[in-house]
Image (cartoon, rainbow, N blue to C red):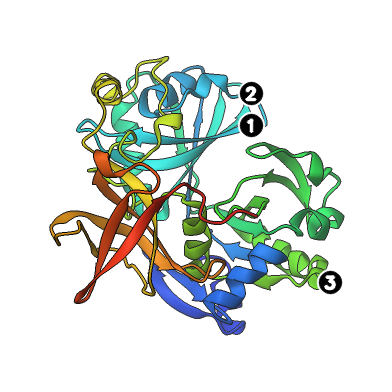
Amino acid sequence: MKNTALTETHVALGAKMVPFAGYNMPVQYEGVNIEHETVRNAVGVFDVSHMGEFLIEGEHALALIQKVSSNDAAKLTIGKAQYSCMPNDNGGIVDDLIIYKIKDEQYLLVVNASNIEKDWNWIQSKNDVGAEMRNLSDEYSLLAIQGPKAIEAMQSLTSHDLSAIKFYSFEVGDFAGIDNVIISATGYTGSGGFEIYVKNEDVQQVWDKVFEAGADFGIKPIGLAARDTLRLEMGYCLYGNDIDDTTSPIEAGLGWITKFTKDFTNSEALKAQKENGPSRKLVAFELDERGIPRQGYDIVDAEGNKIGNVTSGTMSPSLSKGIGLGYVPTELTSVGSKIHIQIRKNAVPATVVKLPFYKA
């Protein structure tokens, strides 16, 4: 089990630690609902240093990225980031990721912790153009400082105007007394804030200064359990749940990051699927009655026939109702469609809704 550079800090703060993607990670501190509300209303800090970072550079860097990713990275300018996915050869997804353009001919790819080795090997197998690749995953830490008070709470730590960093943009500069920090207006909570990329040896100083600066704003450490409820309220896909090697980006509602303005892995087949329409799609649903949908539960029709499965589900802390995502036949994907979630012996009625579940 790997530790992050902050593992001892989490233990000292009383975090409940669990194995996650090969790492010893804090799943919660005070409790999921308290931590969830902290991020929605104030500011919270996640240690997500288990994420992977690959540097792709050289004159052929863009060519490699264009080949393996579904979005059009040619549109990126320096200081911009892009959400994308890497299709496999069989209609599924190797991983979803964020691509940062650091300089001309230099890109940072941020991938999921559970897929670091798989992604590295996949990109390497497609690198017949001679792009330079470096795996920085074990050298860097990542803090997600999320919430509506993040800008105000963190402004004293940097000379950059945080309010000027637009969504999916970033600056490289000073933060909490450390130089060459990536300050990125990204995150997976839907409540605004920043992700801070810093070397392992500097992250303790950054963590301490972040909590010092945020003390008057109600800042708290947040675990992975609340990260999951926050992202689900926004309808953001989680790799391994809602997308995987068997789900296509078209089925998963990720057509918006699948650009057929270029050739990429399996692009012809995905283009045909988009034109013809997939047989199933990922939908968002809310339970009409009390209950908590969980990953793996069957989705059934009015007669009790299985028509799909829940990929993510929870009791929404913000809405106080059961919400979830799941794949169903395309004819049941329009908003207002009625489905049922099999919760133990009960087929609980649910309604297909438009994302996001949570609207600030």
Q: Residue at x 67, y 51 (%)?
A: 194
Q: Nearer the viewer, residue 192 or 306?
A: 306
Q: Identify residue for label 1.
A: 80
Tell me if mark 1 has few (under 14), some (14-19) or many (20+) residues whose alpha carbon lies within 10 angstroms of its own.
many
Q: Nearer the viewer, residue 208 or 268?
A: 268
Amino acid type, label 2: Thr
Q: Residue at x 62, y 58 (%)?
A: 143
Q: Identify residue for label 3.
A: 216
- Kindly indicate the quadrant of the structure image that contains residue 132: top left
- Kindly indicate the quadrant of the structure image that contains residue 122: top left
Q: Residue at x 60, y 83 (%)?
A: 12
Image vertical order of residue 176 relative to residue 277, above or below: below
Q: Nearer the viewer, mark 3 or mark 2?
A: 3
Residue 357: which numbered mark, if any? none
Residue 77: which numbered mark, if any? 2
Quick check: marks 1 and 3 in contact, CB under 8 Å?
no
Give the structural element (helix, strand or loop) at label 3. helix
Among the two numbered marks 3 and 2 on one chain, the one whose residue lies closer to the N terminus? 2
Q: Nearer the viewer, residue 161 or 339?
A: 339
Quick check: marks 2 and 1 in contact, CB under 8 Å?
yes
Label 2 and label 1: CA atoms lie apart by: 6 Å
Left or right: 300 as drawn, with respect to 162: left
Give the structural element (helix, strand or loop) at label 2. loop
